Image: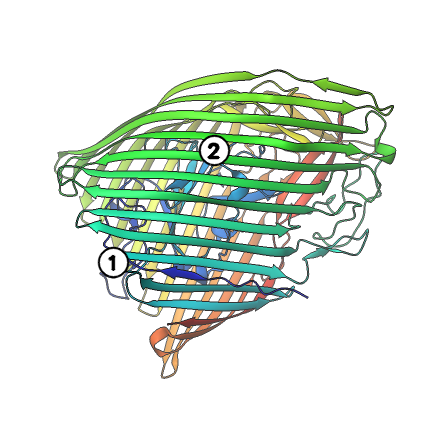
Amino acid sequence: MSVLALGISLGVAPRLYAQAPNAVGDNPGSQVSSSEVSEIIVTAQKRSENLQRVPVSVAVATASQLTNSGVTDVQSLKMVAPGVEVQSNNGYAYPIIRGVASKGSGAGFESPIAFYVDGVYYANATANILSFNNVSQIEVLKGPQGTLFGRNATGGLIQVTTRDPRSTFGGDVSLSYGNYKTFKGTLYLTGGLSQNLSADLAVQGTAMGDGYGTNLFNGKDVYKIQHDISARSKWLWNAGPATQLRFIADYTDTRNSMNAQRIPLGGTAAPPFGPSYGGSEWDVDGDTMPLVTVKTGGVSLRVDHDFDAVQFASTSAYRKTDFTFDNESDFTRTRGRVFGEDQNDWQFSQEVQLLSPKTSRLKWVVGAYYFKAGSRYPRFILSNFGVAATAFSSSSTLSNQNTDSISGFAQATAEILSGLSLTAGLRYTHEKRELTDASTTTVALNGTATVVAPGDQSLLFKKLTWRLAMDYQVTSDVLAYISYNRGFKSGGFNASALTLPPFEPEVLDAYETGLKTTFLDRHVRLNVAGYYYDYKNVQAQRSVNGSTGIYNGAAAEIYGFDGQLQTQISSKLSLDFGYQFAHGKYKQFPGALIAAPSAAGGYTLTPGDASGNTTLLTPKHSLSAVVNYTVPFSEGKLGFNASYYYNSGFFQDPDDVLRQPSYSLINSSVRWTSPGDRYSISIWGNNLTNKAVTNLYSVNSQGGIRGVARANYAAPRTYGATLGLKF
């Protein structure tokens, strides 16, 4: 029987400072009528600004938009932010923006898409798959953010802002039940602890009684959340008329089998494993049950002070993650290959900023960022049994990868002519990577152990990145801009594949032009951007005997355009549309790993040339559309939502062999709210057409040149009801 996991949150709201990352989204549109598009405040330039005044391509989703469109985690963000995709594999997250992505994962490896929560960078990709609770707003910054954010934001970043506490008591609670016996609960409370101190506590939980699929080998459920519970507390102290402190602590504990993988329907097993099997996309047939457990948490302190002549901001943070997964590695019921991993990560970061006064005509920010992290494998083991034990019985890798990085940055915006502004920024990064205590022990069939220990090693990377932009305020409702940005992501070691050499840094030069407009008496907002990316030394993923390695060798170009149209036709009806066109090609990619179907079953993996192939995870077209309609009546109001997403399909790897076909997703909800918004009842459904969409689809090495296609799928059709109460 499933256990009901509840969620609680407690909060209180303060005076807001212009540069504070939490000073957005709490009351969007409070200064405009309900028949106009709401004003959106973003922090894309480290200060709170109107979205329409910022010469950066930013997609924004508010808390109400996320709820209405059924966006409950970062993987479904694409429903409201076209051009953004998040895949997962064994609990790791793979964010993709405008075709910039990596499927690499493991100790010390970081995504080219940075992930921030309340101004804190999350280096560990395993911690990025979170349930949204107490969220105020999500910003997706597209393109390199190499100056102000810097840290591995080659292709952009996803920035989550949670609600600030308020000083008056209140709150809300919700209980949901859906198919697959899914229970979810959240609670939000708010109140002041003293005249100048307020706090909040946010807890949410989910548990499933049934899984999306079945392991045909033993009849047990897979794709099942046993528990997913998270807690987040924010304390806000107004220490003086010009000083604010925010302390945040969070913790998440999750256990699930969402990492289940199978040979795709119609695919073949790699000898000597098998047989291939049927069932649904969410069924597996393996002698090992999939499992992912993640325990992660952290603390942060944000200090803001206004010195009149300059504004000061400091963010200190520490995070820790313990991650475990076990899975089938031959993906059949034949007793063969089993893979298991434990990964422990910690990180400390400190950022200091000095910003120009809010009234200054010259807008500038100067700062420094320090980041120190450690990631280790206490267990990384591939075991062979039965027919698989022809070369060795087990291979175990232990390693540590450490990062020590410091950078300084500055950016300024000056109005050089009436309405015409110039922005220039620089960032210098000095980063050291270390591989320590690394060894791989291979045990032969006769029990003889062979140890490969490369010894302690280090790498040093120094890089200057920049931003140049010019924007022109054509009218009060039209902003045009052009920009040139350079993004950089450091190299590192292959901590799980010690036979592979270190990988080098990648660099992306981005050229962009855009237009931000509001018209028809603020009933319509249209933002469009065109871009060209020159992508050098692209870090690509490869499978090496069950583990993941990173290698360079690719030069790529990606170009396209995207746009977002938001309309408030009346106080009752709103229509939002998003579209992205992207064309990505590898200009040079010798030495790529190429998979070819084998007559004996599975695939063969050999080096080849991927030059001219489509960049991985780059759909040519993606489209989203959202309709919201509200019907008021004497007993409250009814809100209707329909959300649609289309993706033209994409290749999963540089060899252009396995492809996710085009697909469409439809989410919908109906919500009744009582007068005064105290009570609510929602009926909702996601992926209503029950489309099977891959989270992971790639050829996994089975040793030597053998490989097998394996797939993991996003959620099927889900539906249910939610009861809500505000107080």
* Mark 2 vs mark 1: in front: 2
x and y percentages locating residue 610 in the rendered image: 60, 25
- Residue 305 lies left or right of residue 493; in this view the side is left
Mark 1 residue type: Arg
Q: Residue at x 25, y 61 (%)?
A: 30
Determine the CA span between mark 2 and mark 1: 36 Å
Mark 2 residue type: Pro
Judging from the image, what secondary structure is the residue with disc 2 in? Answer: loop
x and y percentages locating residue 36 in the rendered image: 27, 62
- Residue 552 lies left or right of residue 190; in this view the side is right
Q: Specify the label residue 522 is tagged with.
A: 1
Q: Residue reaching furthest bottom?
A: 634
| Depicted 634 relative to depicted 629: above or below | below
Q: Quadrant of the N terminus?
A: bottom right
Q: Nearer the viewer, residue 620 or 72?
A: 72
For label 2, the residue is 112
x and y percentages locating residue 191 in the rendered image: 32, 64
Judging from the image, what secondary structure is the residue with disc 1 in? Answer: loop
Q: Residue at x 42, y 48 (%)?
A: 249
Q: Nearer the viewer, residue 206 or 249?
A: 249
Residue 580, quarter of picture = top left
Q: Residue at x 57, y 68 (%)?
A: 177
Q: Quadrant of the C terminus?
A: bottom left
Tell me, yes or no, whether the two marked residues, 2 and 1, touch with CB atoms within 8 Å: no
| Residues packed near mark 1 inside 10 Å, few (<14), some (14 to 19) or many (20 plus) | some
Q: Residue reaching furthest front?
A: 194
